[in-house]
Image: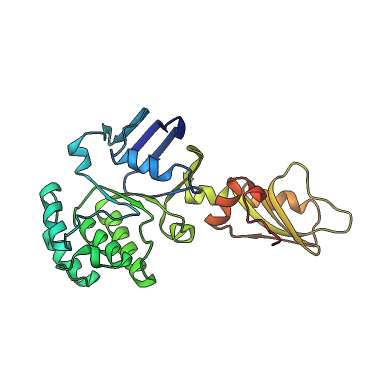
Amino acid sequence: MIEIKNLTKSFEGFKALDGISITVPSGSIYGLVGPNGSGKSTLIRNLMGIYRPDSGEILIDGSPVYENIEVKARIAYIPDDIFFFHQSSVKDMMRYYRGIYPRFDMERYEKLKGVFSLDENMPIRRMSKGMQKQAAFWLSMCMRADILVLDEPVDGLDPVMRRQVWSIIMADVAENGTSVLVSSHNLRELEDVCDHVGIIDHGKMLLERSLSQLQENISKVQIALPEGESLPEELDILHQSATGRLRTIIVRGEPSAVLSRLQECQPLFVDALPLSLEEIFIYELGGADYAVKEIVL
């Protein structure tokens, strides 16, 4: 289990993380989402022990991470910008990681060689960005880590390879209880794989719930009301739009309860629609104020 408690981190007076707390249950995939500059990458670098927190705790199964070699040996990290030694090949990096990670699995390395179809002797610097990401996954999945931390993990991969990579990750979660923390702007993809989601903004946690709880707490409803009828004032409406008499409203609340309240208005038509993680993200960050604005040029 990953536990981050009241974490703060500042850079030259700018507070990048402001008392943020996160819990990633064992054997789960946790999606960390937020706008650019919200503190996602800073949080990950603190989790990896690259940065020293100003205050707060970062624990893996109760043990601190910073300068803890035994704990770090249980974590695999794939950053957005892949690191490798300048002249190294995949085989060179494999030998390097095998000396660091005690559970590095050579049998798995050989099996995955056919999945990624890379020349293990080619210098990584000569590979495309997508090929470098494949090399990073190939090596990371052989470390047999208990914790997998991913920052924009599938950026640059083609759709087939994205599906292949997620299939390997999800198999590790199911079979070995691997815990995965993934930061990504691809919310549609996170929606397919995550058990839990945390939304952060300006270095603070806005909300942290299981994906099912998150979807149950906000409702998207289309409704047409009789002439002169208005929506109940007590509804916590985050956003609404209209096409003719048909309104689409985003309401905080469980769908069945919201529909029951709306039925009292004797609507001409009412229906609850599925709400995507992308829509939840937008409206939790401030509704229409965060939505795409029309600009006349």
Residue 244 location, quadrant: bottom right
Q: Which residue lies furthest to the top in this view?
A: 55
Residue drawn at x 30%, y 58% is: 169
Front residue of 10/111: it is 10
Which quadrant is home to the N terminus? top left
Q: Find residue 40 and report its horizontal and vertical position in percent.
A: 42, 44
Q: Which residue lies furthest to the right in this view?
A: 228
Q: What is the total number of numbered labels drawn onto the structure image?
A: 0
174 lies left or right of 205: left
Residue drawn at x 73%, y 48% is: 261
Front residue of 82/226: it is 82
Front residue of 115/259: it is 115
Picture layout, residue 243 above or below residue 2: below
Which quadrant is home to the C terminus? bottom right
Q: Find residue 29 and report its horizontal and vertical position in percent.
A: 37, 51
Q: Is residue 1 visible to the viewer in this orientation of the structure?
A: no
Front residue of 87/3: it is 87
Residue 21 location, quadrant: top left
227 lies left or right of 93: right
Residue drawn at x 22%, y 63% is: 124
Q: Find residue 255 and report its horizontal and vertical position in percent.
A: 63, 52
286 lies left or right of 267: left
